[in-house]
Image (cartoon, helix red, strand yellow):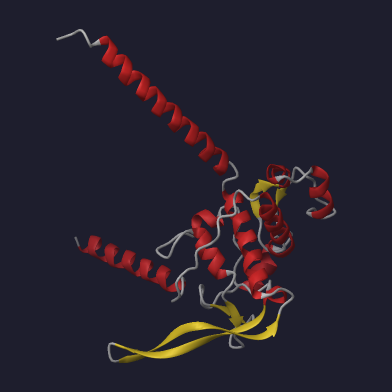
Amino acid sequence: MKKLIFSLIAALGLVAGAHASEGGISWDKAPDKTNDLGSLQNGAKLFVNYCLNCHSASFMRFNRLKDIGLTEKEIKDNLLFTTEKVGDTMKSAIDPKQAKEWFGGNPPDLTVIARSRSGHGGTGADYLYTYLRTYYRDETKATGWNNLAFPSVAMPHVLWELQGTRTPVYEEKEEHGHKVAVFKGWQQLTPGTMTPLQYDQAMGDLVGYLQWMGEPAQNTRIRVGVWVLIFLLGLTFVAWRLNAAFWKDVK
């Protein structure tokens, strides 16, 4: 019995720790772009240019990008490095030993990251959309960056040139007799190459691609599922009328 109680306490501690690591802000709703081929193509480009340097997607092959409208030539010309082939998986070239030395651990594989990061705050896509847009300068950290959705994150802000540098703005409020700092918004310190709206749209494209990459057959599965349900509904109606016809003369 004591072991059971201690196990429950430990589990509650893990859940609390997980919630704390998700930060004290609400997750923003990610736009659904998994059916937008142009958005997915832009997301794939952002992923290869900014994420694949450190993170692998070892369960995804480059040639699967044909499913989002890219030709083999476009994949070769725009998304492959010199030594890679179209049939290769998306593996990072970073040395695991160097990654552990630089970041304290190997960067995680991102193939199913959008499916694995769902929590009490929303879907995995919501988390990623919020995470990619809540970096801010923090000189107390080794990387010089921090994140509201993932406090004390080891990953630096690799997209900072697009977004620029920002700092969070807080407002003090009194709750239950205590003063607390409530997040109110952002103050732009230096501009990026994109406007805030353009950056949000780009992150929506990237998150949409990460969603698609986690299950490339998802949209096909949903379309087929809808037609199967329509067929079963029609079959149910036919069976109901046949049953009524067979038994209409039975008293």
What residue do we see at 28% from left, 12% from top? 245
The answer to whether 153 appears left or right of 74 in the picture is left
Front position in the image: 138 or 126: 126
The answer to whether 76 appears left or right of 180 in the picture is right
Front position in the image: 116 or 209: 209
Can you say which quadrant of the picture contains the C terminus?
A: top left
What residue do we see at 47% from left, 30% from top? 228
What residue do we see at 47% from left, 68% from top? 27
Tell me residue 156's x, y (percent): 64, 75
Q: Determine whether 110 is above or below 61 in the image.
A: below
Q: Determine whether 168 is above or below 26 in the image.
A: below
The answer to whether 35 appears left or right of 150 in the picture is right
Front position in the image: 137 or 8: 137
Can you say which quadrant of the picture contains the N terminus?
A: bottom left
Front position in the image: 134 or 54: 134
What residue do we see at 23% from left, 64% from top? 5
Q: Determine whether 170 is above or below 131 in the image.
A: below
